[in-house]
Image (cartoon, helix red, strand yellow):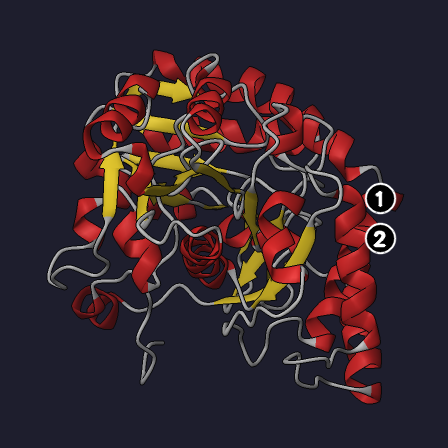
Amino acid sequence: MTGSLWHGFADMGSVSSKGAFVVSRGEGAKIWDAEGTEYLDATAGLWFTNIGHGRTEVAQAVADQLSTLAHYSGFGDITSDITARLADRLGEIAPVPGSKIFFTSGGSDSIDTAVKLARRYWHEQGRPEKTIVVGRSKAYHGMHVAGTALAGIPVNREGYGEFVPDAETVEWDSAKSLLGLIERVGADRVAAFFVEPIIGAGGVYLPPEGYLREVREICRDHDVLFVVDEVVTGFGRIGGDSWFASSRFDLEPDIVTTAKGLTSGYVPMGAVFIAPRVAEPFFAGGVWWRHGYTYGGHAGAAAAAMANLDIIEREGLLAEAARLETDLAEAFAPLADLDSVAEVRTGLGAVTAVQLADPADAIPTVGRLRQHGVSGRAAGQGALQISPAFVMTTDQVHELADRYRAALS
């Protein structure tokens, strides 16, 4: 089944000839295809279904909200009551107390928002020359123009020309690389540094010991905004029983970008957390920030987010995500003994990567995983991404690892 649909990140010639993998139903940590075949969902959709599939409580909350008020403009002095309540609730769990919440339609929107906000902040500080935004090699920051320019995945930029002037890339695992760039171009020109707590779509790479705190200190010392991209890691996935990796590592970021786990993917929504320091010039009066999205803070999406947060809190899913950190390490680390596996990256949050010895085998392996009842995904250069829903049990994790071993043998 393909027809008129153009898939994202796909060789459509291949999809058209082989056919699409059509997912029809989900429940908990499992999905079913159009023929009724059951699969363990190794990736929680695309990193996002933290509470698991099939939560009718979320669907009902959205239905109730849509029946009352589907959405209204969020521009100027207008908002909906559910959106305002969600902003206050997010403010209570923000990595930096007193943060303001700016709603977007998803992760790529959140990144573009952060880029524009960082540059505009320095303009309001009387330092308009601070325009350079810095990302890292291997990093992924969505596929809008600014996020594509920031990201460190060259193939994602091929064929488009230059997207954003003043976008630089440093080595993903070297704080000295960031410091060297700042010293070379001048701190008076650098607006912000963007960092994922773990490299996500670029291959699931864990940060070197002490790296995150070191780059945070470099940004502080040189008056560079520190932007943490928690689109993947937020809402428990790397929290270590905290809502955010930023809280787990005590990073005190200036800006945090989020999406995915905010609604567990039930409807699209993103949110940018803005620390008081950055928000202050815009809340002092007389400043218009001419930026926003038609569906930013969508009332139906806000209802989904509220229900999602209710479930996470009521069922203790932050603790379950922390439990998965141990389960995944125990179940998947032994796969490193396979000849087809170069490395297993695990031990930080509810994520793992199986790095294949031959990167070209990643896509074929995804196909073999389906034959063993697993819906998986390739990431980076020859890695297999594992990022299950927080409701996946310990037994299911070990069953998942057994199926990976069978597919890789």
Secondary element under disc 2, as helix, strand or loop, is helix
Question: Within the image, what quadrant is residue 116 found in?
Answer: bottom left
Could you say where residue 37 lies in the image, as x and y percent from the top left? 53, 58
Quadrant where the N terminus sits is: bottom left
- Is 276 placed above or below 409 here? below
Quadrant where the C terminus sits is: top left
Pointer 1: what residue? Answer: 313
Could you say where residue 303 lies in the image, as x and y percent from the top left? 78, 69
Left/right of residue 225 with respect to residue 152 in the rendered view: right
Crowd tier of the residue under label 1, counting other residues whose Cα lies within 10 Å: few below 14, some 14–19, many 20 or above: few
Residue 272 appears anywhere in the view: no
Pointer 2: what residue? Answer: 310
Could you say where residue 121 lies in the image, as x and y percent from the top left? 48, 53
Q: Nearer the viewer, residue 160 or 63?
A: 160
Q: What's the residue at 21%, 56% (across, down)? A: 165
Question: Within the image, what quadrant is residue 100 found in?
Answer: bottom right
Q: CA distance from mark 1 to mark 2?
A: 5 Å
Could you say where residue 69 lies in the image, as x and y percent from the top left? 79, 86
Q: What's the residue at 26%, 62% (across, down)? A: 10
- Is 394 placed above or below 144 here? above
Secondary element under disc 1, as helix, strand or loop, is helix
Give the farthest residue toward the front: 126
Q: What's the residue at 44%, 50% (across, down)? A: 122
